Image (cartoon, rainbow, N blue to C red):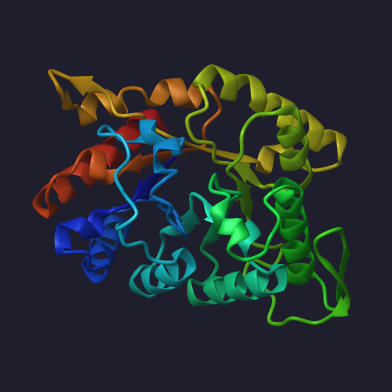
């Protein structure tokens, strides 16, 4: 298994400054963490925040409100890439459907070169309709747009000239060099739910799955379906990854990191290849961060 650091909101330790958080991520890289996972939020609507669907990933409910600062994910990953050597650069998730496919392909190619081939990007469609209406992008059809963007990026990353013809993305005979360092294309993971239509979408276009708050038994039932459909399409299911985030365990009224990490075998039984840990659940100040990293790495080694 791989162990992944989610540093969401650690800048609150530093008055909102992101640069010291990069120092923490560099420490994780030096100690041997496998990946860093950045979340993304674009716009905020205080009238709909109570509908945020992923409160369960935090021990204290939703960590943010409409006044919380958020930094763009790929820009942040470029800064992290310049300070690290081995750690994979992931998102969980990037709102790919708010991007232009060709610009996204170019952005991620640039990041792949800066990092010397360490990008594994996680895509999703988000939950807030405002993100779409503000840009004149239809909220309806966003899942189909996600698949087309992933397929179009893959064409740009592996062909020159490249062509793609879809409902949302359409180009013919274009050149966009350089190719990524990862010559077969940058891995694109989907952070979407386990519906039958989404199973088909992932089997067709994704390199991995990074769901949130899907019960582990449902994940375990869904993963073989994705892999079977991949095989039916002539894709290698053994290359498909699954990243799951541990849910904080409460003991004696407080979050217990050791008890939380003890749940990892259940996630592995569901098929997880990558385990994500959101540091803010378990760390209350920077001085606690090294011990947190060591505990996560020990859990990885124990379960590998």
Q: Who is closer to the viewer here, 130 or 185?
A: 130
Question: Is residue 174 positioned above or below 22 on the image?
Answer: below
For residue 47, which quarter of the picture?
A: top left
Residue at 29% x, 41% y is: 297
Q: Position of residue 269 (x, y in %)?
A: 51, 21
In the rendered view, does 149 fall on the left or right side of 249? right
Which residue is pictured at 71% across the width and 36% down the height? 198
Q: Is residue 255 visible?
A: yes
Q: Residue at x 38, y 29 (%)?
A: 303
Q: Quadrant of residue 77?
A: bottom left
Q: Position of residue 41 (x, y in %)?
A: 45, 56
- Is 285 on the left or on the right of 56, as rendered? left
The residue lying toward the viewer, choosing from 195 and 304, is 195
- Whether 95 is drawn above or below 114: the answer is above
Which image quarter: residue 98? Answer: bottom right
Q: For this view, does 133 lie left or right of residue 44?
A: right
Q: Is residue 253 above or below residue 210?
A: above
Q: Is residue 234 above or below residue 221?
A: below
- Farthest-out residue, front: 47
Image coordinates of residue 19 in percent, x first then y, are: 25, 71
Could one spot residue 180 in this view of the protein? no
Total marks in image: 0
Looking at the rendered image, the quarter that the C terminus falls into is top left
Q: Is residue 59 left or right of residue 210?
A: left
């Amino acid at each position: 298994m791989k162990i992944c650091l989610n540093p969401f909101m650690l800048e609150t330790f530093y008055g909102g400054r992101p640069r010291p958080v990069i120092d923490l991520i560099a420490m994780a890289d030096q100690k041997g963490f496998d990946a860093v996972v950045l979340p993304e939020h674009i716009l905020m609507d205080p009238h709909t925040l109570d509908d945020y669907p992923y409160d369960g990933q935090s021990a204290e409910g939703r960590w943010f409100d409409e006044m919380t600062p958020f930094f763009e994910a790929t820009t942040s990953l470029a800064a992290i890439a310049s300070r690290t050597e081995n750690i994979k650069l992931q998102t969980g998730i990037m709102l790919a459907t708010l991007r232009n496919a060709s610009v996204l392909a170019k952005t991620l190619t640039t990041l792949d070169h800066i990092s010397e081939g360490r990008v594994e990007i996680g895509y999703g469609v988000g939950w807030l309709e405002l993100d779409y209406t503000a840009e004149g992008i239809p909220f309806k059809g966003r899942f189909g747009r996600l698949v087309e963007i992933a397929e179009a990026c893959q064409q740009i990353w592996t062909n020159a000239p490249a062509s793609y013809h879809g409902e949302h993305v359409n180009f013919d005979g274009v050149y966009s060099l350089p190719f990524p360092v990862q010559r077969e294309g940058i891995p694109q993971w989907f952070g979407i739910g386990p519906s039958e239509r989404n199973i088909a979408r992932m089997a067709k276009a994704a390199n991995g799955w990074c769901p949130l708050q899907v019960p582990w038994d449902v994940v375990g039932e869904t993963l073989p379906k994705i892999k079977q459909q991949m095989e039916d399409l002539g894709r290698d299911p053994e290359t498909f990854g699954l990243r799951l985030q541990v849910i904080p365990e409460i003991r004696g009224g407080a979050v217990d990191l050791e008890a939380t990490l003890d749940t990892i075998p259940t996630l592995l039984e569901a098929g997880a290849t990558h385990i994500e840990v959101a540091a803010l659940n378990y760390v209350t100040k920077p001085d606690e961060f090294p011990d947190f990293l060591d505990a996560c790495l020990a859990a990885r080694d124990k379960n590998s």
